[in-house]
Amino acid sequence: MTSGPIYLDYQATTPLAPEACGAMQPWLGGPDSTGGWANPHSAHLLGRKASAAVEVARGQIDALMPKGGRVIFTSGATEALNLAIRGALPALAPRRRIVTIATEHAAVRDTCLWLEAQGHDVVLLPVDCDGLVDMPAARAAITPDTALVAAMLVNNEIGVIQPIEVLSDLAHAAGALFVCDAVQGFGRVALPQAADMIAVTAHKIHGPKGIGALWVREGTALEPLIHGGGQEQGLRSGTLSPALCAGFGAAAKLAAQRAEEDAAHVAWLRDRALELFAGWQVNGSLSERYPGNLNLRRDGLDVARLMSDVRGVAFSAGSACASGSGRPSHVLTALGLSSREVRSSIRLGFGRYTGIDEIERAAQLIVDAANRQMG
């Protein structure tokens, strides 16, 4: 990649693909633009051209989704998940139970906990030591009074892939809707074909930040969270950015084209990383896992000090979304790790633009610093 720190934080965000950057350029409205700055919701010629770019992008994203639904652009996955969960509940009344997993991203977990404070019955399903959902607990919790089940396809902190299709079947058997947070799996892992709603975002697949989407199965009733002009199919008010949409669409198209190549590359990087970090413990299932996420632990290690010592590598001590909170990772805690073990864990994320030499140099820097610290 470029000079500077080796970037191994792909779960936080991914480098912008050149193809996505190129797709955005005509719609950024620079001094030489021929109308790329136009409002895509305007009826004149320039507006219609901008609108056409948005629709091309919508189709590129929809091509990776199940059949029989529509794509609604949002500001990101957090908004998409709020729209899915909170927007669906009114039509599901009087059912008030929401079932999700204890290791969900805060976009789902905190939304559900907020709804619990509003009077909804929220169940956080436990996971086993590998981070996989407790299926007997899921079967017991998903009852006929359940309105909605929400589950993450690929966990952002430990990369574990949940049995989404089974959870989806349980939800539908109880008459509930199923919402999937596919942020970390979109373009990399097969999506659940029976989901009712799927939330994704651009910047996790080498697209721009500030743009996400909610795929909604036809016939699923939703109420908007944001009121105003109703620009986005009556469900999301606000002027869309053709540039952001175009970048997202190009990134999705590229992900589909490179799926096999990217998967093989990431698996190769994972295998080499495991060799280099021999003796470190992997947090979460190694078999049911996206290979571009390695959450590793070396007991007794002070990761805060490690990150300070290893300035040449950009990696994470947990989820970037919760950094600075001072709270131990709720995901690692749910696996049964002690506070000390959580503080001894790091997350390495890599992907399409990571070189094998970067993995090797980063591992040497991290392992050497850890050895010095451990004496």
Image (cartoon, rainbow, N blue to C red):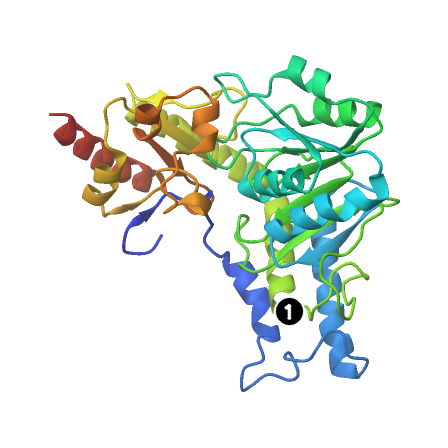
Report how many numbered discs are placed on residues in the image. Answer: 1
**Measured along the vertical axis of the image, is residue 288 above or below residue 354?**
above
Q: Residue furthest top?
A: 136
For disc 1, the neighbor class at 10 Å (few under 14, some 14 to 19, many from 20) is many
Indicate the position of residue 365 as horizontal and vertical percent values: 21, 38
Q: Quadrant of the C terminus?
A: top left
Indicate the position of residue 35 as horizontal and vertical percent values: 66, 83
Asked if residue 185 can be seen in this view, the reply is no
Q: Residue 325 sits in which quadrant?
A: top left
Q: Residue at x 65, y 16 (%)?
A: 137
Q: Residue at x 25, y 41 (%)?
A: 307
Q: Give 121 or 276, whichever is nearer the viewer.
A: 121
**Measured along the vertical axis of the image, is residue 263 above or below residue 214?**
above
Q: Residue furthest right?
A: 219
**Measured along the vertical axis of the image, is residue 10 above or below residue 242?**
above
290 vs 98, left or right, is left
Asked if residue 204 can be seen in this view, the reply is yes
Per the image, the residue denoted by label 1 is: 241
328 vs 92, left or right, is left
Q: Give 173 or 112, whichever is nearer the viewer.
A: 112
264 vs 94, left or right, is left
Q: Residue 332 sits in which quadrant?
A: top left
Q: Residue at x 58, y 36 (%)?
A: 260
Q: Amino acid at mark 1?
A: Ser
Q: Residue 187 sits in which quadrant?
A: top right
